[in-house]
Amino acid sequence: DSLQGYVESTGPAALRGLLRDCGGRCCLFNNRAVGAQRDAQVDELLTLVQKMLKEGPSPHYTNELYVEATRLLECVDTELEKKCELLS
């Protein structure tokens, strides 16, 4: 059972529409995860973001925030929390 399958079969119409608008891309997180499980979730999210970036710019990501987020993703010496703070 995948999150995408669950949303498509039993989720609210608005959520199904959002998933469709996002090209079927979604990422599920366990907010209580710690340690290696939390790190794996972060890696999954970053992999999804990098895949989206490689697919080419979208009309939703053409402003200065996109440029700054792309630059920060390339900084391997900065923790994810710090990257998020810098984008806020």
Image (cartoon, rainbow, N blue to C red):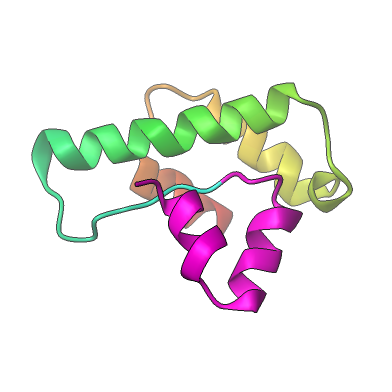
Q: Residue at x 47, y 33 (%)?
A: 46
Image-based side of 21 in relation to 77, left or right: right
- Can residue 79 be seen here? no
Q: Is residue 3 magenta?
A: yes
Q: Residue at x 42, y 21 (%)?
A: 76
Which of the pair 22/68 is nearer the observer?
22
- Can residue 46 be seen here? yes
Instruction: State how many labels appear.
Output: 0
Which of the pair 11/68 is nearer the observer?
11
Quadrant in which the C terminus is drawn: bottom right
Which of the pair 18/67 is nearer the observer?
18
- The location of residue 27, given as percent across then percent down, is 45, 47
In the rendered image, the vertical position of residue 31 relative to residue 75, given as above or below: below
In the orientation shown, which residue stands out farthest toward the right? 59
Q: Quadrant of residue 69?
A: top right
- The location of residue 17, given as percent across then percent down, is 70, 66
Q: Residue at x 76, y 25 (%)?
A: 55
Majority SS type along the magenta span: helix
Which of the pair 67/28 is nearer the observer?
28
- The boundaries of the magenta stretch are 1-25
Q: Residue at x 38, y 51 (%)?
A: 28
Q: Is residue 21 magenta?
A: yes
In the rendered image, the vertical position of residue 3 relative to residue 72, given as above or below: below
- The location of residue 9, given as percent across then percent down, is 52, 63
- The location of residue 18, given as percent across then percent down, is 67, 64
In the orientation shown, which residue stands out farthest toward the left? 35
Q: Quadrant of residue 23?
A: top right
Image-based side of 82 in relation to 88, left or right: left
